[in-house]
Amino acid sequence: MRSGVGFDADDEVTIVERVAAIDIAKASGTVCVRVPHPSIAGRRSTRVWEIGATTNAIIGLVEELAEARIERVVVESTSDYWRPFVYLLQARGVTTWLVNARDVKQVPGRPKTDKVDAVWLAKLNERGMLRPSFVPPVEIRELRDYTRLRHDLSGERARHKQRMEKLLEDALIKLSTVATDIFGVSGRMMIDALIAGERDPRVLADMAHGRMKVKRNELIDALTGRFDAHHAELAQILLDQVDTLNERIDQLTARIEQLIAKILAAAAAPPTGDGGDGDQANPTRSVVERLDEIAGVGEHTAQVIIAEIGLDMAQFPTPAHLVSWAKLSPRTIQSGPKHRGGKTGKGNPYLRKVLGDAAAGAGKTNTFLGARYRRLVPRRGKLKAVTAISRSILVIAWHLLNDPNTRFHDLGSDYYDTRLNKDRKTRNLVHQLQALGHHVTLTTAA
């Protein structure tokens, strides 16, 4: 008898009696409802029809599904067109699953029509062969809109700053070779003076502040160019754009702070009739401050983490579920005796971006995460090291969000050194020297 690896496999198909599915398009949706046949036992009755994607049409559909006692509705994620369907269904109290389009691919060989797609989606729904995507509650969705817009506007601001640098290069002004940030105090004053008509590089160099003052001779050479009237006009337009974006980003940041304070205050409020025990940790101290204690994580990063994954970790039963959802889990692909690593996947771009920035920042710190990053880079490369540290940060964030009494404790940059197996390390080094042709004699240090 051959031995093998045992694992649990549920071969029984659980049928959800009353299901519906919606195949989404921009201006319409194809609905399929499958319920038990009213007169033939063991048979299913299928009805398919098309509705418009307007609010009134969807509300009418929601009421019809509720009256039909539909147990679960599945909606395929298509661009942003799924939002009105899911939001209105959830508001009515109908159990609604948003599913990834990759999970509901049409079977090869079948015709590709909206009607067939809707029926196929309903069949997958009734057999429990789908998994729902994470749709955060209303208040987190609102917060997410603000943080994502701030991210997008910050990207626009960075692009305008790069255009300014290119414009100065076109005018033979090499300010960026001397100043780390041409939009710093010194750089901004010099650009304003150039726009106002000042062309003397010595006068411009005298506007340097702080550490830039010691670079006066370099600034004189860098500011000697051919900055003319058309450069001044274009530079003023770019500066106005950057200033406007700065105002909007500051406005969004202030609004984000208000929303988070409101969400945390609601979370801190005791249930009706419960006065509280006074010993419970105050969430308004808050999650942002506790996340900010993680190496590499700043206030803005903490705000984005909250906006993207929410405060309730019930959606992610374990840190592994959260990491898998964010597509930061290492994948192993096996084919016969061969094993190879696979790509982690795309995941949530906004969350991955801030976690990657936090991981890169943590790699420069004298902390456990910094030491781990520096250990991984020589063996796995910088990109995989950043992904690994991003995963560690997300796991830490899950624990902090899951338990309001938990605080971050850094293990220290010497964590690995203090747990080093000295005998094994010694043997490895001796074997390396012997492989190079050396005779090794060990003497214990006094």
Image (cartoon, grey):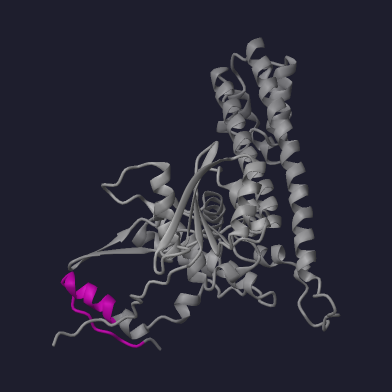
- Residue 343 position in % (x across, y down): 36, 55
Looking at the rendering, the stretch of residues picked out in magenta corresponds to: 427-444
- Identify which residue, 218 or 65, lies in the foreground: 65
> Which of the 4 image quadrants contains residue 123?
bottom left
Query: Can you see residue 340?
Result: yes
Position of the N terminus by quadrant? bottom left
Image side of residue 429 versus residue 81, left or right: left
Tally the marks: 0
Q: Is residue 37 left or right of residue 303?
A: left
Q: Is residue 389 visible?
A: no
Q: Is residue 1 magenta?
A: no
View extreme (top): residue: 229
Quadrant of the frame with the C terminus: bottom left
Q: Nearer the viewer, residue 408 or 398?
A: 398
| Image coordinates for residue 58, horizontal then vertical, percent | 62, 46
Residues 211 and 134: in front is 134
**Residue at coordinates 34% horizontally, 88% vertically from top-left?**
444
Outermost residue, left side: 1
Q: Is residue 115 left or right of residue 314?
A: left
Residue at 42% x, 43% y: name it. 114
Q: Can you tell which quarter of the image residue 236 is in?
A: top right
Answer above or below: position of 192 versus 404.
Answer: above
Q: Residue furthest front?
A: 39
x and y percentages locating residue 68 in the rendered image: 58, 59
Q: Residue at x 77, y 48 (%)?
A: 255
Q: Nearer the viewer, residue 218 or 385?
A: 385
Classify 26 as above or below 82: above
Q: Is residue 246 left or right of residue 410?
A: right
Position of residue 132 measured from the top left corner of the image (x, y, whole percent) = 50, 61
As displayed, is residue 128 above or below residue 50? below
